[in-house]
């Protein structure tokens, strides 16, 4: 007889994460029935999760029939974890300087080889009112992302081709590269010019340039992202600052 307990544990963990994401999206207290609807799950199973989270101090009841809302415990835990991150602590000053000198959003990322996507490890928001907005933990398609291309360049050609073999790459618009040959040509050209780009390939009005960086023996990448018109008008200047930041990190960390 097959033991189903591991699958159940994974599903429960996923439900907890989904509850956190729902509160982040809705930004208001939610009743049990509302949460069940958002989760597309039975009220009975949601009740157990809410009671457990409330019992651990992560949720509180806003008032009788006013729904549940997260306490500050979740934020405190997240801040404690983030402040002790061994990599982000080392790169943070350089990321902040890059954000301040370019005045655009700066993203630090790594390849998620299991899911074959780019994961954003940190996002430093631009001070501009009109800017590229993203959050740490976001997952992006490798082929339509400047960070993805920069990270692909750190892999052997055979590894890159194996990653895309048998996969249908999503075309976000007519600019998106959707063939292995096109991606390989773009990587070659990007190395020669000194920056990897996503100029409206995933979102029509958003542009970004990126460059790989090796930190503590592992491959990461940094990007500068913003409205397409601002990125395109500052390509060379931003690229130079980006490479300087990456070179500094590689030589000093």
Image (cartoon, grey):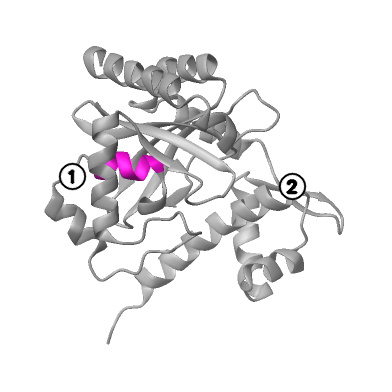
Q: Residue at (52%, 31%) from the top-left corner?
A: 231
Confirm whether residue 95 shows in the render: yes
- Whether pointer 2 and pointer 1 mark residues with C-beta atoms closer than 8 Å, the reply is no
Q: Secondary structure at mark 2?
A: loop
Q: Looking at the picture, how far across and down is residue 121, in whole percent?
A: 42, 37
Q: Residue at (75%, 69%) from the top-left corner?
A: 33
Most prominent secondary structure in the magenta stretch?
helix
- Point out the residue furthest to the bottom here: 1
Magenta-span inclusion, residue 150 = yes
Q: Does 192 appear above or below 172? A: above
Q: Does 195 appear above or below 203? A: above
Residue 221, by quadrant, is: top left
Confirm whether residue 124 shows in the render: no
Residue 2, by quadrant, is: bottom left
Foreground residue among 162 and 58 = 162
Q: Looking at the picture, how far across and down is residue 180, in whole percent?
A: 25, 59
Q: Residue at (45%, 27%) from the top-left corner?
A: 235
Where is mark 2, residue-wise? Answer: 27
Foreground residue among 20 and 241 = 241
Please state if 228 lies on the left or on the right of 24 as rendered.
left
Q: Secondary structure at mark 1?
A: loop
Foreground residue among 107 and 92 = 107
Please state if 37 lies on the left or on the right of 189 as rendered.
right
Magenta-span inclusion, residue 3 = no
Where is mark 1, residue-wise? Answer: 155
Residues drawn in magenta: 146-152
Please state if 170 lies on the left or on the right of 44 as rendered.
left
Lower sequence index among marks 2 and 1: 2
Q: Does 231 appear above or below 116? A: above
Q: Nearer the viewer, mark 2 or mark 1?
A: 1
């Amino acid at each position: 007889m097959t033991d189903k307990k591991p699958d159940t544990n994974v599903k429960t963990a996923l439900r907890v994460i989904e509850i956190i994401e729902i509160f982040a999206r809705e930004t208001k207290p939610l009743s049990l029935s509302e949460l069940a609807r958002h989760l597309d799950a039975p009220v009975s199973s949601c009740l157990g999760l809410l009671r457990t989270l409330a019992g651990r101090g992560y949720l509180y009841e806003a008032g009788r029939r006013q729904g549940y809302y997260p306490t500050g415990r979740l934020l405190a835990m997240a801040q404690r974890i983030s402040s002790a991150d061994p990599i982000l602590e080392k790169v943070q000053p350089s990321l902040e300087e890059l954000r301040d000198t370019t005045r655009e959003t700066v993203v630090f990322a790594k390849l998620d080889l299991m899911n074959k996507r780019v994961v954003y490890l940190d996002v430093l928001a631009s001070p501009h009112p009109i800017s590229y907005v993203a959050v740490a933990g976001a997952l992006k398609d490798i082929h339509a992302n400047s960070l993805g291309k920069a990270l692909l360049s750190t892999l052997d050609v055979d590894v890159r081709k194996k990653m895309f073999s048998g996969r249908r790459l999503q075309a976000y618009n007519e600019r998106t590269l959707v063939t292995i040959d096109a991606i390989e040509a773009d990587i070659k050209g990007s190395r020669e010019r000194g920056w990897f780009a996503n100029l409206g390939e995933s979102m029509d009005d958003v542009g970004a340039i990126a460059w790989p960086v090796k930190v503590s023996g592992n491959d990461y990448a940094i990007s500068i992202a913003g409205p397409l018109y601002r990125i395109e008008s500052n390509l060379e200047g931003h690229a130079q600052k980006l490479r300087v930041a990456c070179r500094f990190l590689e030589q000093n960390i």
